[in-house]
Structures are given as C-alpha cells and as structure tokens.
Image (spheres, coloured by chain):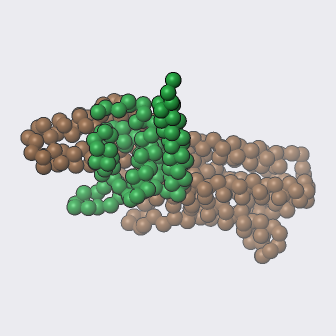
Chain colours: A green, B brown
C-alpha cells in the first residue's frame, strides 16, 4: 500500500538516524533494511537517500568513512553524538504528532 | 548507467564535488545490478531496473547540488578586515616613531587582495604544487613561515609600542582579536572531514598561533626577545602579505568543506 509521500519524507531523516543509531551502514544497506523492517511500505529510492545522507553529514549529524569489503570500497555512515540528540528530539515530536492524530480519530462526534 | 551518472553530475555545479558523488552513486547502482542479476533478471533488464530505482537523474542531481557547494567564510573576512583597519590606523596615525607608514598600508592592502585571490584557489592544488617542488616527500602539516626580519620597533615590538601609546587595554584587545583569529582557524580546520584540508588549516593555525604567542612573550619580556613578528601588525612587507595568504588558504579550506571527500589521491600537479 502506498503511504502519503509527505508523511514519509518528513520523517525520513529520523528513520535514517534511527537505523544508524543501531549500527553503521552504507547506502544500499539502509534501503534494504528500511524495506524489510517496514514490510515493503518504505521503498526508498537511492536518489532520495543520498542527498539526505550528504545533507545530514554536512550538518554534523553523521560521520562518513570508507571500508573495503569483498573487493568493493563502500562509504559507511555513522551517527554522531549530535545526531543522537537530534534523533531523540525528532522521536518525541513524532510521538506527540502520532498521539494527537490518534486521539482526534478516536473521538466520536 | 553512464548516461544517468552524466545527467546527474551535470546538475552539480561545483565540479570538484563530482569525484565524491560519482563514487558513491556508481557503487550503489552496481550493487543493485548484482542483486538484480542474482534474482535471475537478464542483464539488460538488471541495468535498467537498477537505474530506474535511483530516481530521476535531474532531481537527484539538483538535490545533491544544494548540499555540495563552495562556502565563503564571511565572519573570517570581516574579522580580518577589522584587523587590517586597526593595523593601518596604528601605523598611519600621526606619530613620529613609526617610519614607513605608507609602505605598511600598501603592503596591507596588497595582502588583503592576495587573501581574496588565494581563497578561490583549490587548496589541494596548492598542496600538489608544493609536493611537486618537494618531490616525493610526504606532505606533513604544521607549516611555519620564516621570521627573519629587521628587528626594529615597528616590527617586533609593535605590541609594546601599542600599549605605551594607547594603553594596556588596547594591547590586550589586539591580542584578543588575534587569538580569536587563531581559534577560528583551528575550529574550521578541525571540523574538516577532508584530511588534507584539516592539516593545511592546522598548519596555518599553528603558524599564526606560534608567531602571536612568541611575539607576546617577547614583548612582555617573558623570554629573550628574539626577532618575532605579530601577524598583520608588525611591519615587514613579505610577512604581512604572508599573513593574509595564510588566511586565504584557510578560507579556501572552508570554501570547499562540502565539496571534497575525506581523502584524495594526491598526484603530482603535472601528471
């Protein structure tokens, strides 16, 4: 089922930070993990992910390093302390938003 | 696939960021292709599917262009402009003790212009030039510039002169401003993800900081006053210009902070 694009793009940074808060990953890995965890709801395009990653790195929320594996050189991203702080903030905001929506939907007229 | 990469890169105006971006995008598409092949797709379809999965080349290129842009260190420029004005004022204000005030002002202006020229130059190109001259030597950070100059009042003891004529507060203010400049230089350098940028920036920072500190100690008699040089303020034509060039280098490092990857391969400039 295709979810509203706006809902997804707003929280994308938060989701990426969450993945990286668990372990360092490279771009392709992030897309696969996101797809698996969301049961194919999030089919993130690489063209959306990379500008996002570069932007986050530029803001100091992520670090990047290169590592070789199986003859390929991959760029791995890791979350910084600042990144973790940002993630916590976004999680709180999301929870507030989600709770509010649920409440309004649950209320009878 | 090559067409996709080409179209995408065309959107990224800063050419120097291309190597950084191409590596990552190409690696991704290749991996996607392999996964597709593993699933049993025929080769042509595997390539097409991998490219389509990326998203629109123009859109992605534009998004990346927005991130990877050269940036101007404005607060650095303003700080140095303030320093230059104070320095010129000090030398030019009617005072019999300092000779060659006009010459000083000229050098300061030349220096400022040099700074604005140097900052536009890609600092990795400068490093390659130096490497070219040094042959196969490794480029180690921590450059220093030679401070052999004529020891006279306007030169090494400008700080004392300053305090005597304008009060200790003035001297302390100038020291403060210069130390602020050094700190800024280090802050910019340390934040660099590009290692060469970090080293060159720290080298400039060390050059400033060491000269400033030695000059302060020399002036206050904390140790033997050898001929030292207070960057921007002491008169000594070449050294003034060098001070500005160092700032130009650090501005170049800052300018390309979003553009270069962590490492480059440093080849000789003429290869």
Q: Nearer the viewer, residue B123 or A94?
A: A94
Position of residue A10 measured from the top left corner of the image (x, y, whole percent): 45, 36
Residue at 57% from the left image edge and 41% from the top image edge: B72
Which residue lies most toward the top here? Answer: A109
B154 shown above or below B60: below
Position of residue B115 measured from the top left corner of the image (x, y, whole percent): 60, 45
**Residue B76 relative to residue B98: left or right:** left
Q: Nearer the viewer, residue B153 or B32?
A: B32
Residue at 46% from the left image edge and 59% from the top image edge: B195
**Residue B266 relative to residue B150: left or right:** left
B256 shown above or below B203: above
Specify whether residue B105 is in view.
Answer: no
* Tally of marks: 0
Which residue lies most toward the front here? Answer: A108
Q: Nearer the viewer, residue B235 or B21?
A: B21
Residue at 65% from the left image edge and 46% from the top image edge: B76
Position of residue B197 measured from the top left corner of the image (x, y, whole percent): 49, 55
Specify the quadrant of the image occupied by residue B265: bottom left
**Residue A104 relative to residue B183: left or right:** left
B7 shown above or below B139: above
Specify whether residue B214 is in view.
Answer: yes
Residue at 25% from the left image edge and 57% from the top image edge: A72
Specify the quadrant of the image occupied by residue B219: bottom right
Q: Quadrant of the N terminus of chain B?
A: top left
Position of residue B165 measured from the top left corner of the image (x, y, whole percent): 91, 55
């Amino acid at each position: 089922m295709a979810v509203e694009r706006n809902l997804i793009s707003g929280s994308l940074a938060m989701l990426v930070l969450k993945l990286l808060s668990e372990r360092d990953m490279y771009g392709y890995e992030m897309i696969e993990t996101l797809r698996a965890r969301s049961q194919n709801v999030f089919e993130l395009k690489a063209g959306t992910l990379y500008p996002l990653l570069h932007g986050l790195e530029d803001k100091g929320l992520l670090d990047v390093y290169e590592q070789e594996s199986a003859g390929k050189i991959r760029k791995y991203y890791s979350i910084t302390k600042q990144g973790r702080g940002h993630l916590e903030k976004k999680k709180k905001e999301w929870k507030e938003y989600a709770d509010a929506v649920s409440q309004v939907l649950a209320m009878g007229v | 696939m090559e067409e996709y990469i080409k179209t995408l890169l065309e959107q990224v105006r800063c050419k120097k960021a291309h190597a950084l971006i191409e590596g990552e995008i190409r690696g991704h598409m290749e991996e996607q292709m392999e996964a597709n092949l593993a699933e049993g797709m025929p080769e042509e379809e595997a390539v097409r599917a991998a490219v389509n999965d990326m998203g629109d080349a123009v859109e992605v290129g534009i998004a990346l262009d927005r991130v990877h842009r050269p940036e101007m260190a404005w607060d650095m420029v303003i700080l140095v402009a303030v320093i230059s004005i104070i320095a010129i004022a000090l030398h030019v204000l009617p005072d019999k003790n300092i000779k060659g005030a006009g010459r000083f002002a000229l050098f300061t202006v030349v220096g400022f212009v040099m700074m604005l020229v140097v900052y536009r130059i890609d600092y990795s190109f400068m490093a390659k030039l130096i490497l070219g001259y040094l042959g196969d030597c490794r480029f180690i950070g921590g450059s220093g510039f030679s401070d052999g100059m004529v020891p006279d009042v306007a030169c090494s003891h400008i700080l004392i002169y300053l305090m005597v004529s304008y009060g200790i507060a003035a001297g302390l203010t100038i020291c403060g401003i210069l130390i602020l400049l050094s700190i800024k230089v280090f802050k910019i350098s340390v934040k660099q993800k590009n290692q060469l940028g970090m080293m060159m920036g720290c080298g400039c920072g060390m050059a400033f900081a060491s000269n400033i500190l030695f000059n302060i100690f020399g002036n206050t008699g904390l140790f033997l006053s050898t001929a030292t040089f207070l960057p921007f303020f002491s008169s000594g034509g070449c050294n003034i210009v060098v001070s500005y060039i160092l700032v130009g280098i650090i501005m170049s490092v800052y300018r390309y902070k979003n553009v270069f990857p962590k490492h480059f391969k440093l080849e000789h400039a003429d290869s």
